Image (cartoon, helix red, strand yellow):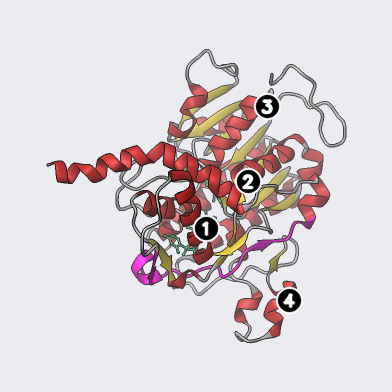
Amino acid sequence: MAGTKTRVDLDGNTIKPITICMIGAGGFIGSHLCEKLMSETPHTVLAVDVYNDKIKHLLEPDSLPWAGRIQFHRLNIKNDSRLEGLIKCSDLTINLAAICTPADYNTRPLDTIYSNFIDALPVVKYCSENNKRLIHFSTCEVYGKTIGSYLPKDSPLRQDPAYYILKEDTSPCIFGSVEKQRWSYACAKQLIERLIYAEGAENGLEFTIVRPFNWIGPRMDFIPGIDGPSEGVPRVLACFSNNLLRREPLKLVDGGESQRTFIYIKDAIEAVLLMIENPARASGHIFNVGNPNNEVTVRQLAEMMTQVYSKVSGEDAIETPTVDVSSKEFYGEGYDDSDKRIPDMTIINKQLGWNPKTSLWDLLESTLTYQHRTYAEAIKQTIAKPSAN
Ligand SMILES: NC(=O)c1ccc[n+]([C@@H]2O[C@H](COP(=O)([O-])OP(=O)(O)OC[C@H]3O[C@@H](n4cnc5c(N)ncnc54)[C@H](O)[C@@H]3O)[C@@H](O)[C@H]2O)c1
Ligand SMILES: O=c1ccn([C@@H]2O[C@H](COP(=O)(O)OP(=O)(O)O[C@H]3OC[C@@H](O)[C@H](O)[C@H]3O)[C@@H](O)[C@H]2O)c(=O)[nH]1
């Protein structure tokens, strides 16, 4: 059971229980991280968020084995003076809070910039002033587009990894023009990374920056009309899950040609736990966390999700499983896209010896099994409702 046997870090030292102030703990990544910390470690979590639906199963009932090691604090970090106190009484702060769905970047650019830069400023300041360690969640989007995307379509250099592999210490950050408001998120994340790095250099802040590459799994975002707004546009996993559950074609934005590498949330959480428990190896570093072996185009993702969903639901796929849609129609003015995202793994391998394990097929199978179990019945009922009236 957690906390009863001695746990050691990568250098063989005993790991002491710590208190973690986790901001954004009620979100997708936060919920999985809380689960891991409760079930496998003796650490205490002060879970900060405006919502707690995704961690309710960890908070109630009081008889849970980890009761007393997790406390929920409902607060908005934009305007709550309790934040500094929570950071002060913790050993480590993990900041996950952000607006991080692409549908918001070009339609709510001010909220996006405030959330990802301005609202993170007090967190960095309180950590720095109180000599507290910070693990800050940035994004793979800080790389923007690949160098290769600017080469002629038929250039053989496009096949050369030097033109597309994304490396923390050498790759440039290439964003579109200011009118392309898609980049408001990436740019805000880049500036907060630079500020944290500067706090480290000038004031000795002990920090780690995480750049997640499309982490996916259960509890990601919401299903429109079921546990989120009917008109809401979540990230691609939830969009495609929603289409599959409703037996609608999956929408391929601009032909679904963009490429992504997807990693199973449970693999990625292992990497975060190593960062938490190996501060000497993790501090001062920026880490890509992704699975370079799971690369697909968005079209291939749609095809694979359709096949996997048929398997887990026992339903045949619909006759026309996908439909093309323009980015302007789907996201509106100012959308732009990252063409390709493959993480270089050298730094995380060297510092933490970590590697992802789960194939794309396997992670989709467990995730879509969860989506089917969680939502299929509710969707059936909402579809049945109008005809019943
Ligand atoms: N999931 C991914 O693949 C991915 C990829 C790149 C970067 N990230 C980064 O990781 C972090 C977590 O992402 P996620 O996928 O869990 O997103 P999420 O939206 O599920 O979680 C973010 C949480 O932060 C909370 N939050 C936002 N603003 C807040 C505020 N002002 N006060 C209190 N709580 C607030 C939200 O309520 C939400 O629960 C984000 O910073 C995101 O940019 C995630
Ligand atoms: O229904 C859909 C939804 C999305 N897409 C496409 O699928 C791709 C992936 O879309 P996602 O919604 O997962 O978002 P992106 O990968 O572009 O960005 C994400 O990456 C890293 C994080 O910082 C954020 O969580 C988010 O910005 C994009 O090319 C998008 O245009 C579709 O083709 N159809």
Q: Compare marks 1 and 3 and give the one earlier in the sequence.
A: 3
Measured Cα–Cα span from mark 4 to mark 3: 41 Å
Looking at the rendered structure, the kind of residue marked 3 is Glu
Q: Which mark is residue 82?
A: none
Give the secondary structure at mark 3. helix
Of label 2 and label 3, which has the lower sequence position? Answer: 3
Which residue is situated farthest in the top direction here? 63
Q: Is residue 216 visible?
A: no
Q: CA distance from mark 1 to mark 3?
A: 32 Å
Q: Viewer-nearest of labels 4 and 2?
A: 4
Q: Residue 65: horizontal and vertical position, in percent?
A: 59, 16
Q: CA distance from mark 2 to mark 3?
A: 22 Å
In the rendered structure, which amino acid carries the disc numbered 2?
A: His
Q: Is residue 335 left or right of residue 161?
A: left
| Dot 4 and dot 1 residues touching (CB under 8 Å) | no
Residue 348 position, x and y percent, is: 76, 51
Q: Residue at x 71, y 53 (%)?
A: 286
Residue 32 appears at what percent x and percent y?
Answer: 57, 36
Please identify, in this view, whether the residue under mark 2 or under mark 1 is nearer the observer. 1
Q: Which residue is mark 2?
A: 136
For residue 362, say whether it is visible: yes
User: Of residues 34 and 247, which is closer to you in this image?
Assistant: 247
Q: Which residue is mark 4?
A: 160
| Residue 330 inside the magenta-drawn segment | yes
Q: Is residue 267 above or below residue 14?
A: below
Q: Is residue 4 magenta?
A: no
Q: Which residue is mark 1?
A: 304
Dot placed on the residue nearer the N-terminal end, 4 or 2: 2
Q: Residues within 10 Å of mark 3 (few under 14, many from 20)?
A: few
Local crowd size for mark 2, using a 10 Å CA cut-off: few (<14), some (14–19), many (≥20): many
